[in-house]
Image: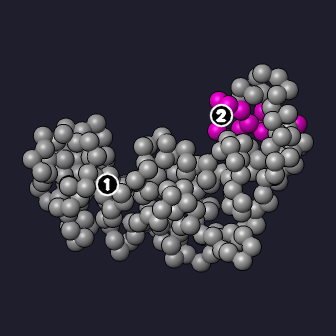
Amino acid sequence: MKYTELTHEILKGEKKLQVVEPVTQEDFDFFNELLSIDDSTKNDFDCGDNANGFFKAYPDIKKAIGAERAANVFYARKLGYSCECIPNKLMFLLMSAIKEYNGTNTPNLILERVGTSIRQYANVEWKNGESIFTFKDVLDNAFGRSVNIITEYNSIVTNGDFTELYVENVDRVAVLSKDIGSLISYDDARNVRFDVDNGLMLGEYPLRCFKGRLGITMDEFDLRECI
């Protein structure tokens, strides 16, 4: 699935309702008791981020919690809190990626990086009382504000201090400093391509050299700190 196909599913796809049982304080306390049985159990939990792997190693803990609820409890414990009506795994994946990729202003970069893991939630909605929450609502919540998402119709958006650009020929999201992004029109954005020798290009011009830069960057798709 291409990135713009994923965002189409998130924004426009037909939604199906999913009911998630909340994790209670009693669940937290019971799971903590199980983790404290011995040091190796707690250490394995602290060092791993995958519920399936953890419960494969500790099937008795999964059985004690309940097979259908175990993953939601696991990721709530990882987060340090439980989301009221959405899967804790979804929020954990988003928050972990934001931290790992310095992505507080780059929601499209985060979506691209976790795309495979969160694809199952793209066309899901969740109900809390009379309110309905979509994946976009969850994304906005993770970033603390309404964020702009790249679509098949709009290849370039601004979020916070940075511009995000979809590069179609490699199906990647690039992050640009706002001054570089300000030089690229909506029409130009569709023509940006990645070249293995020169990086991101608009026609014959490398984006990393825009605004008189030397074009020095550690990552061809991250021009936030390009010199």
Magenta highlight range: 45-60
Residue 58's spot in the image, x, y percent? 81, 34
* Residue 101 quadrant: top left
Q: Is residue 2 visible?
A: no
Instruction: Give how far apart the Cα atoms at labels 1 and 2 are.
Output: 32 Å
Up-down relation of residue 39 to residue 185 (above or below): above
Q: Residue 19: which numbered mark, if any?
A: none
Q: Circle 2 sits on which residue?
A: 48
Total labels: the figure holds 2
Q: Circle 1 sits on which residue?
A: 162
Q: Residue at x 31, y 54 (%)?
A: 162
Instruction: Say which element carries label 2.
Output: loop
Q: Is residue 63 magenta?
A: no
| Left or right of 148, for residue 135 | right
Up-down relation of residue 157 to residue 68 (above or below): below
Q: Quadrant of the C terminus?
A: top left
Q: Which numbered disc flags the more N-terminal residue, 1 or 2? A: 2
Amino acid, disc 2: Gly
- Coloration of the structure image: one colour
Up-down relation of residue 25 to residue 49 (above or below): below
Residue 91's spot in the image, x, y percent? 61, 53
Residue 216's spot in the image, x, y percent? 19, 38
Q: Nearer the viewer, mark 1 or mark 2?
A: 1
Q: Residue at x 81, y 52 (%)?
A: 24
Q: Residue at x 67, y 31 (%)?
A: 46
Disc 1 and disc 2 in contact, CB within 8 angstroms = no
Instruction: Say which element carries label 1.
Output: strand
Residue 109's spot in the image, x, y percent? 41, 53
